[in-house]
Amino acid sequence: MKHFILLSALTLSASVSAQNLQKGDYGYLYCHMGGDGEYTAYAISRDGYHYEDVAGGRPIFDAKEHARIEGGTRDAFICREHRGKGYLMVTTDMCVAKSHKWDNYGIDLLTSKDLINWKSVTFDFRKGPSIFCDPQSPDVYKDWSTINRVWAPQTFWDPNYVWPDGKRGGYFIYYSLWNSAEEKYDRMYYSYADESFTKLTKPRLLFDWGYATIDADINYLQSTGLYHMMIKKEGGKPGIYTATAPKLTGPWSEPVEDDYVSFEGKKKCEGCSAFQLIGDDTWRVAYIEYSSNPKHYRICKADRNLRNFSEPVDIQGVRAPQHGSFMRLTKKEYKRLQKLK
């Protein structure tokens, strides 16, 4: 009987859905790349639509301190540490203003206890196996030094991941990679980071649809029991599309072609981020429409199944919005950020 109970407990544990911790019922944090510079900024809101810049929209930290390759932090994604004891951020280590090209070579993993003071590690993928915690694992490239892009990382706590020593739980980090010497376009890959958020496994291919894909944003939906990914695809009709999977690592479906963020027409969109309003089981999908001048950072509605996109509006109150992410805040967190000057 004891063996049966133990086996049942292990089975239940193994089937727990991966999910980022959601906490806070007072407001929202919009953590984003500065629209007028390659740094990370904050804005806060009570309703999810109308925001006020934190510290006047200036950098929340010195990008050069944490982006050790190029000195710029783009595409900031923020979430809570899975036990609720701190915060995590991942950024694209990239500075177009410095390099004058749309190439980059790595990502930055950051940790904080208070949303203000951050520690970080940088992974320069050109260095190859030596930077990863599993150097003996198979390589996805013959030559790592020819990597062109490591773009838009995001992370998701996965309690089911098992490390070689038997320890369970890791941060699933997904991003696009392009090594022009060995592949034709940007493809989605993933690695796992340990609980300290300082060690990273070698990349593994997440999927390949036959054309470039970037800026993926994954959420688990209890309403469907599936992981839903919003993503910019470069093939076929322009827009932001949805794919689904039973597990974070897939298999991922082909994008849904008849229900996507289509109301921007031929204008180009990217950097999507889906979030739920407090007390509401429907979704909001934010993204940057970047082919207009000036650009428009938009938020549209979706139903509880992250379908039927509608009613896009511009974000309000942010001086220079760009690719970023959203996190709910407690009153204490909100007031702390509101005091930053």
Image (cartoon, grey):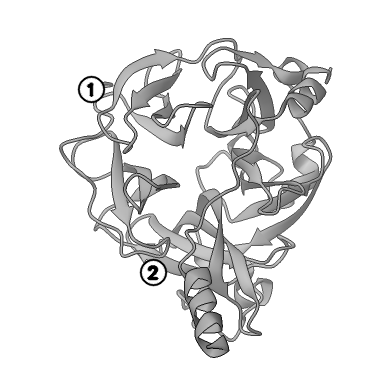
Disc 2 marks a residue whose amino acid type is: Glu
Q: Which residue is at the front of the view, 44 or 136? A: 44
Left/right of residue 199 with respect to residue 339 in the rendered view: left
> Please, is residue 54 above or below residue 145 in the view?
above
Disc 1 marks a residue whose amino acid type is: Gly
Quarter of the figure that contains the C terminus? top right
Question: Would you name the residue on which mark 2 appears?
Answer: 182
Q: Secondary structure at mark 1?
A: loop
Q: Residue at x 69, y 67 (%)?
A: 199
Cα separation, mark 1 vs mark 2, equals 33 Å
Rendered location of residue 84, percent (x, y): 71, 48
Question: Would you name the residue on which mark 1 appears?
Answer: 265
Rendered location of residue 235, percent (x, y): 23, 45
Please report whichever mark, 1 or 2, sits nearer to the chain's N-terminal start. Answer: 2
Q: Residue furthest left?
A: 258
Left/right of residue 46 with respect to residue 225 in the rendered view: right
> Please, is residue 21 above or below residue 122 in the view?
above
Rendered location of residue 83, percent (x, y): 70, 54
Judge depth for marks 1 and 2 and give the one in front: 1
Residue 118 image-quadrant placement: top right
Q: Which mark is residue 211?
A: none
Asked if residue 59 can be seen in this view, the reply is no
Q: Residue at x 58, y 23 (%)?
A: 35
Label 2: how many Cα within 10 Å (few below 14, some 14–19, many 20+)? some
Q: Secondary structure at mark 2?
A: loop
Asked if residue 163 can be seen in this view, the reply is yes
> Please, is residue 303 above or below residue 94 in the view?
above
